Image (spheres, helix red, strand yellow):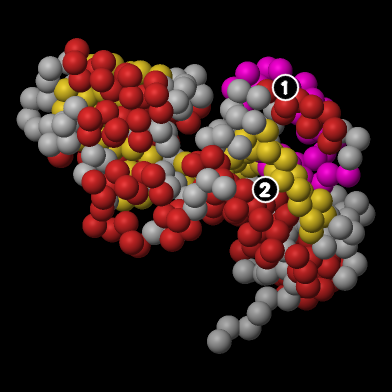
Amino acid sequence: MSKRTTISDIAKVLGVSNTTVTKALNGKAQVSDEMRSTVIKTAQKMGYRTNRSAQALVRKETVLYFIYSREPYEFNEYYGQGFEAALDELADFKVSGFLRPIKDMNAANEMRNILIELDSTKVDGIIMAPTVHSFEYIDELRRLADKGIPIVYLCGKLAEVAEKGCVRLNSLVAGRTAAEFLSLTMREGRSSVIFANNKELTVHKECISGYMAEAQARHLVVKGIYETQDDKEVAYYLARKVINEIPDLGGIYVSSYNSVGVCNCIEDMNKKDDIIVIGQDIYPELVKKLNSGSLRATLFQDQFNQARTAALKIFDYITGTIDSIGDILVTPHIVLKSNLECYDSGYLRTERS
């Protein structure tokens, strides 16, 4: 078994004192930014792991906030569970956290009010899933960032405010995977369409871009891109519309959690054998569609571990264990009826309370 790297080992390599290394790793002001960066990079290369238990004895409490929308529940519930799991892991290190849910992705005013509140509250780090209409609260978010509070985004970024990191689905790969799947499973000569939540949201822009690029490479015809606004009834209506208006339709890619409305329409019109649907995410109602065959595949992005990773990374950044977070892209996993049992049972059983 290899010897565990110590602060003394790092100090010897750099030719500095143990005290300098300790101060650099703990974010103390007495060390220059250049030295701190050098120490952290050397520590990472040497496989050094901070002794969090020892640091917790002298560290003040770290307070994290997670702001996310309640709806769509089927998707966002797992974010909340992942954040709470990270808090459990960090409970011995003087970390406390608060879930601050807003109504839905359109509740920009609620988001603004929470950010105003945080401006006068103790907060060491913020994890958030941006909403639409971000212009309504961008000034408040920028104010917090300017105070040195690190922000980590989930799902998508806000270009107007610099973040310390972002944990999200690799949406380009998701789109490419969906296009490849349909090209391999659709009947020859059939066309496809894309159903997205909102084409202006980064995650859906990238899903669409990835799909279109792969479709072109595979000579897969795309006859339209439709916005469902993550509404099951809208998805149902649009599915019926495209089925009636596009006689050669053979595949539908749903680039959000909202595949159920499409699948309901496929079932009602008795089109399970004619039209192949690939969606995204896993939750109990969607599992039923996989088992029934109206949904042939879904792309799993593991929201639980996205939120958990974001919380652990922002804590490590705050405490100086790492000097940056950056973009963490989650590779989508293609889930079929045959391999569904391999995925975390929590996604298969969590129902709306």
Quarter of the image for residue 194 reads top left
The residue that appears at 53% across and 46% down in the rendered structure is: 352
The residue that appears at 65% across and 24% down in the rendered structure is: 107
Badge 2 marks a residue whose secondary structure is loop
Could you tell me which quadrant the N terminus lies in? bottom right
Is 343 magenta? The answer is no
Q: Position of residue 113 (x, y in %)?
A: 79, 27
Is 149 magenta? The answer is yes
Whether residue 156 is visible, yes or no, is: yes
Query: Horizontally, is 250 left or right of 141 in the view?
Result: left
Badge 1 marks a residue whose secondary structure is helix
Q: Which mark is residue 324?
A: 2
Q: Nearer the viewer, residue 165 or 69?
A: 69
Q: Which mark is residue 89?
A: none
Q: Earlier in the sequence, mark 2 or mark 1?
A: 1
| 47 lies above or below 300 | below
Query: Horizontally, is 76 left or right of 214 in the view?
Result: right
Query: Horizontally, is 126 left or right of 199 in the view?
Result: right
Q: Position of residue 250 (x, y in %)?
A: 16, 28
Judge depth for marks 2 and 1 and give the one in front: 1
* Other residues around mark 1 within 10 Å, as few (<14) / some (14–19) / many (≥20): some
The residue that appears at 29% across and 33% down in the rendered structure is: 264
According to the picture, the residue beneath numbered tag 1 turns out to be: 109
Q: Magenta stretch: give its range.
A: 122-151
